[in-house]
Image (cartoon, helix red, strand yellow):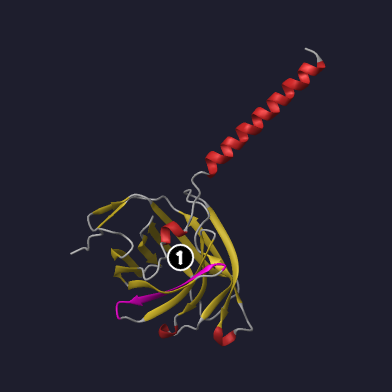
Amino acid sequence: MSRLLCFKFGIFLWIRWIVLAGLIWVIGCGEQFLAQEYVVFTENAYWLFDGNFAKIEIIETIQGDSTEYTLRISDQNGKPVHARFLGYQGQIYLSKVNASVFGYPDTRFDPPVAIFPHTNRTGDVEVMDAAEIRDWDAKNPIRVRVQVTVLQPLPITLAEMRIDDILRIRINYAYIDPNELPFLAGESEWWFGKNIGLIRYRIGSTLYGELVFSSTMAGFVVQQ
């Protein structure tokens, strides 16, 4: 084979592999994971639970470079925790928590903490470090580490409706710097249904809940 033919054959192989690699990339990116499809933060949405925290509702939405959502999370006695989340490029970040009714300070996070993974592949783990800044001691930020693990999704039936497309994650919130008031410390597990939002939660060994009604799901039947 002449040098010219060898050169042309080499160019042909190179182009073929470039095209093949491009096709693989396109196919792999075709089903892009977007965390916001599982939280469904829409205007005035709410969720009712049979559990320690009985109601979650969106009470404010502010559009900007990122969308800011304020959630009111009420316990069985109506005592509220307010949490501020940011939605940006398909991801959800926790930026502030106000739990003063439970004796905790207003707390913000720098940077805001990504509480969802960037994929839904079982076994994937993501770790993020941030500072927990409390309003009564803002000059002394506390370093924290948040680990999010994607767990095996299992179908769940709620109110006579089977939900198959589920994101199930475990969040471990740990303090790098010791402190006397470990506000969010510990492990929790969260189940989210696509286009529904939160459907089940477990926080530590004492707080738990399961969805009984959601404004985000048409035709959802309330449990009797």
Q: Amino acid at mark 1?
A: Glu
Magenta span: predominant SS is strand
Q: Position of residue 64 (x, y in %)?
A: 54, 70
| Figure quadrant of the N terminus | top right
Specify the quadrant that holds the C terminus: bottom left
Q: Residue at x 72, y 20 (%)?
A: 9
Q: In screen coordinates, is 168 left or right of 32?
A: left
Q: Is residue 7 left or right of residue 151?
A: right
Q: Is residue 137 magenta?
A: no
Magenta stretch encompasses residue 68:
yes
**Residue 177 in the image: above or below residue 9:** below
Residue at the bottom extreme, as displayed: 136
Residue 130 percent location from the top left of the image: 60, 69
- Between residues 206 and 213, which one lies in front from this camera angle? 213
Question: Magenta segment, which residues?
Answer: 65-77
Can you tell which quarter of the image residue 160 is in? bottom left
Q: Position of residue 137 (x, y in %)?
A: 59, 85
Task: Give the image location of residue 219, x and y in percent.
Answer: 25, 58
Tell me what residue is drawn at x 58 percent, y 63 percent.
Answer: 128
Q: Which residue is mark 1?
A: 187
- Residue in the picture at 42% in, 58% down: 38
Numbered label tally? 1
Horizontally, is 181 left or right of 38 in the view?
Answer: right
Foreground pick, 204 / 57: 57
Rendered image quadrant of residue 220:
bottom left
Dot 1 alpha-carbon crowd within 10 angstroms: few under 14, some 14 to 19, many 20 or more: some
